[in-house]
Structure formats: structure tokens, C-alpha cells
Image: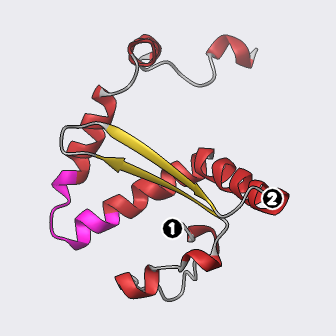
Amino acid sequence: MFSFFKKNKKEESIPTPEEFYIPESQYDGCISFIVKKDGEVCVDIDIDSEDESCVSNLAKLVTVISREECYIETLNMIQEGFTEGGTPELFSLLIIKMAEHLPEETRNSIAKTGEQPCIKPSDML
């Protein structure tokens, strides 16, 4: 459950599983991502009911997880977890593995851009 948009930056603590658990009666929808031992990625979507309010809240959830801020915050949370666990090198390995899973066209476009300046000198004229 991502509640990082409402984080209290002054005092953060890692919730216990009991504190993190939210009873089904208190949420409209849930999206769970799971990777099996064989590498298969599964997505499970649960919605409390098919009324307009639940669908609206599910739409909000889908919108949040598609934002770049969510992606960056997720990576930050993973990095903090590895660092606090004493294995920060695993975050570097994660990034390398993520790059390996990028689509070929994305990897090619990254390779083509190389080290080009954001603003070309000719644009300054």
C-alpha cells in the first residue's frame, strides 16, 4: 500500500505487518503485483463492488501507479530497504537487471542519445 504522498517527513517509521494491514471493509480496490519463483509476473485486481464510487477510486489507484513519481518513490523505498538491510549493492544489481528487461527499442534509443547536450550550441543563437 503506497501512502507516500501523505508521508510525514519529520518522523518516518517502518510499519509492522499488523499496522500495514487494512481490512477489506476499509478499501474499495486493491492491485497486487506478484512475481512467482519461475519469474512469471502476476497482477491481481480486487474491487469491493461495481458501483461508481469503487470504480472511481480504482481509477485513482491506476492513475497513481502510472505516475513517474510513484515509480521513483518505489525505487527510493527499495533502495532504503536494501541500505537499511546492509545490502546496498543489491540496489545496483536491481537497476542493472531492470535495464536488461527494457524493450529493445528503448535500449537502442538510450544508446543513440549517448552524451548529447540538452541544449545544442546552435540552439543558443
Q: Is residue 47 above or below residue 62?
A: below
- Which residue is located at x 43 percent, y 20 percent? 115
On whether residue 82 falls in the magenta region, the answer is yes
Mark number displayed over residue 51? 2
- Which residue is located at x 40 percent, y 11 percent? 108
- In the image, 85 versus 39, the foreground residue is 39
Mark number displayed over residue 21? none
Q: In this view, does 64 lie to the left or right of 73?
A: right
- In the image, 32 versus 3, the foreground residue is 32
Residue 116's x, y, as percent? 49, 18
Mark before the other along the chain sequence, 1 or 2: 1
Q: Which element is circle 2 on? A: loop
Image quarter of the C terminus = top right
- Which residue is located at x 30 percent, y 41 percent? 95
Q: In this view, does 82 lie above or below 95?
A: below
Q: In this view, does 61 lie above or below 17?
A: above
Q: Which element is circle 1 on? A: loop
Q: Coloured how?
A: secondary structure
Q: In this view, does 22 lie above or below 73?
A: below
Give the residue pinned by disc 1.
1
Q: Give the range drawn in magenta.
A: 80-90
Q: Alpha-carbon neighbours of circle 1 within 10 Å: few (<14), some, or many (≥20)?
A: few
On whether residue 12 falls in the magenta region, the answer is no
Residue 77's x, y, as percent? 40, 63
Residue 81's x, y, as percent? 29, 67
Residue 102's x, y, as percent? 38, 25
- Which residue is located at x 52 percent, y 79 percent? 22
Q: Which amino acid does label 1 sit on?
A: Met
Q: Is residue 9 left or right of residue 34?
A: right
Q: Alpha-carbon neighbours of circle 2 within 10 Å: few (<14), some, or many (≥20)?
A: few
